[in-house]
Image (cartoon, rainbow, N blue to C red):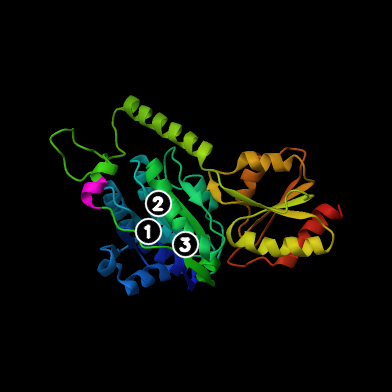
Amino acid sequence: MGKELRLMKGNEAFAEAVIRDGADGYFGYPITPQSEVMEYLMVEKPYEKTGMVVLQAESEVAAINMLYGGAGCGKKVLTSSSSPGMSLMHEGISYLAGSELPCIIMDAMRGGPGLGTIQPGQADYFQVTKGGGHGDYRLIVLAPASVQEMYDFVEISFDLAFKYRNPVIVLTDGAIGQMMEKVYIGEQKVRLTEEEIKEKYPWATLGKTPDRERNIITSLDLDPYRHERHNIKLQKKYKEIEKNEVRYEELNCDDADYIIVAYGTSARISQKAMDIAREKGIKVGIFRPISLWPFPKKALRQLSERVKGILAVEMSAGQMVEDIRMHSVETTPVEHYGRMGGVIPTPNEIVDIIENTFVKS
């Protein structure tokens, strides 16, 4: 952690981290509840500090394709949006994944479907973890549960994006984006020069040199067998990510009889529910997936073998619960509790569900 401590909103912390990590460009379009990201960047004027470009595109479709151009040049670029905007971006996200281009896409989820509401939700899980666009591709998905993680996950996400040449989603929601907490701010990084990019990322399209062939970045190949080989290469990369990049957190799971599985805002609320349940003598623990893809399936399965029940808590009709059921032992019951439309569950509601579903049954 750095030495500087600030009180910031989650969206502001994310934007500050982008500047501090030496990003080259942000391209976005305003949409509640993440508009503070662009507003903060506009006010801070990072171009005057680091040379970073901040541009409001004419639409989400334009923004995601600007990322394609920037990432193709080996630049650290990103965008941010919210649920309906993410829907518009998914064709471009598929292009980025197919072309193996690194970038960050922050999604501050809101209630849906359709335009829905501006209140927080968690119904984009399918969209980002199962591939909202076309094709057999995967996105690395990280879910922060605090304002500090909104800051910290920027550096982690850029590192993962360039390590694997793959888009990374930072999946948050309106509650974490709008809440204010203390944040430790790190040192300012220097942006890479064009020469440093050429040396570090030889695949980047920064102009052909006499000693090599042209760098061609595309997701299009009209030869089906050659394109199949490309897909096989992608699948091999995804297996490597699944092997190396699983992240999760366990709270009071060692002696737990019942486990709550939740991420983001739901995980924060579930911590209070866990405390209330333990005061009542009910041994509850929390399993928080931090990487929603790759999903921490092995750790969850091992945990499911020794508990009496699992409760998935989501601000949705039930999406992550499908992965939980898939990766838990069949003998352990898995139930779901969710609120929709921007309604946030309360700790007491969660405790009531655990008591009535598992303890008293």
Q: Which of the two residues, 50 or 268, is positioned nearer the viewer here?
A: 50
| Residue situated furthest left in the rendering | 210
Tell me where the magenta segment starts and ends, as one range. Answer: 193-197
Please give the count of numbered marks on the rendered protein. Answer: 3
Residue 246 at x, y = what percent? 55, 43
Q: Residue at x 52, y 63 (%)?
A: 148
Could you tell me the amino acid type at mark 1?
Asp
Is the C-beta separation of discs 2 and 1 under 8 Å?
yes
Q: Residue at x 75, y 48 (%)?
A: 254
> Mark 3 = which residue?
151
- Quarter of the rendering containing residue 306: top right
Could you tell me the amino acid type at mark 3?
Tyr
Residue 204 at x, y = what percent? 26, 43
> Mark 1 = which residue?
21
Q: Is residue 311 magenta?
A: no
Could you tell me the amino acid type at mark 2?
Phe
Element marked by disc 3: helix
Q: Earlier in the sequence, mark 2 or mark 1?
A: 1
Q: Earlier in the sequence, mark 3 or mark 1?
A: 1
Residue 281 at x, y = what percent? 85, 59
Could you tell me how far apart the alpha carbons at marks 2 and 1 are, in whole angstroms?
Answer: 9 Å
Tell me, for residue 115, which label it has, or none: none
